[in-house]
Image (cartoon, rainbow, N blue to C red):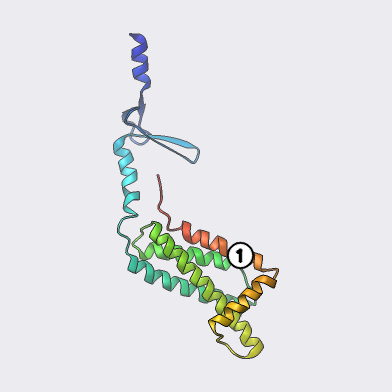
Amino acid sequence: MEEKREEEKEQWYNCSACGKKTHITTMNVIEGKGKTLILCDGCYKGVRSPLEKETKNPNMMGAVLIGIVAAIVGALIWFGFVVATGILWGLISVVIGYLVGKSVVWGSGNKRGVKLQLLSFSLTCLSLFFGEYLIFSWYIHDIYGVFWIPVNAFILLYKEYLSTSPRAFLDFLFFGIALWIAITVPRARKI
């Protein structure tokens, strides 16, 4: 009889948030960052509910519009930095990824999810492409006196640059980091 009481006693745990006794069959265990939390159903729903709301009904029009503005501003800042300093600093592309990702989240009404991740990724790609286009056009202007070059000519020149420049590795590295950040900023948060 005494052993059965001990077993029953061991099957009850205190909720990490409110302290309420929770049976082992109804408790919710959350592990992360080196800590394990045991939550009763009420506390678990209180934590999970706001995170689930973050993915419901994003304002896609707002996300697209604010994201496009951020992408254009990011490309222009990068271009302006290169023109002003003469330095092609890859870290600015990482900032563009973060700027676009945060802007997409903000424009969507502080929502998150896969659709917003894809939008952020796409707009960051376009921003990086537009920034590189402006920078290449600037260098072409210095050499040939023509500022706007056709996009197909830019693509051919950029392919040549990527295949011959020792710096191309850094471009791939920073662009990869920028795109990773653009995807992770609007990612749905989990408990």
Q: From the top left corner, tell me how far across and down residue 180 is, in percent.
A: 52, 59
58 is higher (above) or lower (below) than 88: above
47 is higher (above) or lower (below) than 151: above
Q: From the top left corner, tell me how far across and down residue 165 is, in percent.
A: 69, 71
Residue drawn where x is 59% and y is 64% of the image: 174
Residue drawn where x is 34% and y is 55% of the image: 55
Q: Is residue 63 left or right of residue 100?
A: left
Residue drawn where x is 32% and y is 61% of the image: 58
Q: Find the residue positioned furthest to the top.
A: 1
Identify residue for label 1: 172
Quarter of the picture holding the C terminus: top left
Q: From the top left corner, tell me how far across and down residue 101 is, in percent.
A: 45, 63
Q: Amino acid at mark 1?
A: Phe
Total number of numbered discs in the rendering? 1
Residue drawn where x is 50% and y is 68% of the image: 125
Q: Nearer the viewer, residue 30 or 172?
A: 172
Quarter of the picture holding the N terminus: top left
